[in-house]
Amino acid sequence: MTDQSNLHVYMDWIKERLDEMDATLASLENTATKMQADSRVKADSALKDMRSARDAFRTSLKQHADASKDAFNRSKVALEEQWTAFETNVQTFMEAAGKQAKQQQDTFHARADAQRKTWQAMMDKLQHDASSLAAKHRPEVETALKLMKSEADVANAKLEKLHQAGSESWVAFKTALGETRASLERASQAVHEAFKRAA
């Protein structure tokens, strides 16, 4: 059960980043078509590298559905490196695009929406799974789910406030997304730990 719970956390981690990658690419690909030729070369190269990182995540999601703890720990290290490379390439793209505040806002908004949708799907699934637990085991899991919902609400409020401000730099947007992602991961881990104890 421990390996299975760890696998769920790992798969959620991959899925969350994959959703953000897809949203980012969709937003940036639209901008790349409108760029000047000299900036376009750098932007296209960054997009190519982002697609490669995204594809590695997608492949890992498919390959590791039944992986052992050791296998997904090794994969996670490699995927963390891919995630870092993806983020570096987003920064490269933003630099190639110049200080286009609208592009930064659009990309931030797309990623924030992807986070929200992933969180909601994760919470819905966990809530469904909790309903199948024996009554005596439900309170701890439901408490952890409430914490997760609370963390998601705080994260949504933070992202919405930043989006409304609109004049932040890409670094500020990226930092906020990282903070909300980390907050949800901690809450998700707590829910999965509660499930392990209930099993």
Image (tube, rainbow, N blue to C red):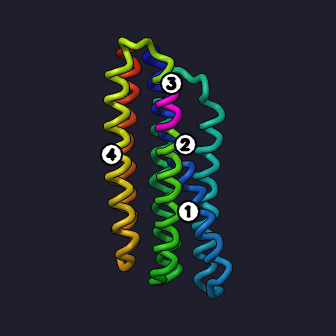
Of the numbered discs in the image, which one, if any, rests on residue 151? 4
Nearer the observer, disc 3 or disc 2? Answer: 3
In the image, residue 22 sits, relative to residue 69, either above or below, namely: below
Q: Earlier in the sequence, mark 1 or mark 3?
A: 1
Query: Disc 1 on helix, strand or loop?
Result: helix
Taking the spot 59% from the left edge, 70% from the top edge, the residue there is 28
The answer to if 119 sits in the magenta stretch is: no
Task: Work out which quarter of the rendered image holds the C terminus and state it.
Answer: top left
- Answer with the quarter of the image where residue 23 lies: bottom right
Q: Earlier in the sequence, mark 3 or mark 2?
A: 2
Query: Residue at label 2?
Result: 15
Of the numbered discs in the image, which one, if any, rests on residue 129? 3
Taking the spot 53% from the left edge, 33% from the top edge, the residue there is 125
Q: Earlier in the sequence, mark 1 or mark 2?
A: 2
In this view, the residue in front, 17 or 160, is 160
Nearer the observer, disc 4 or disc 1? Answer: 4
Disc 4 marks a residue whose amino acid type is: Glu
Nearer the observer, disc 1 or disc 3? Answer: 3
Extreme residue in the front direction: 135
| Mark-to-mark CA distance, 1 and 2 | 14 Å
Are dots 4 and 1 in contact, CB under 8 Å?
no
Disc 1 marks a residue whose amino acid type is: Thr
In this view, the residue in front, 117 or 68, is 117
Disc 2 marks a residue whose amino acid type is: Lys
Taking the spot 45% from the left edge, 54% from the top edge, the residue there is 84
In this view, the residue in front, 189 or 145, is 145
Q: Mark 4 Cα within 10 Å, few/some/many (few <14, many 20+)?
A: some
Q: Earlier in the sequence, mark 4 or mark 1?
A: 1
Query: Disc 2 on helix, strand or loop?
Result: helix
User: Could you say where residue 156 lies in the image, as x and y percent from the top left?
Assistant: 38, 56
Are dots 3 and 2 in contact, CB under 8 Å?
no
Q: Mark 3 Cα within 10 Å, few/some/many (few <14, many 20+)?
A: few
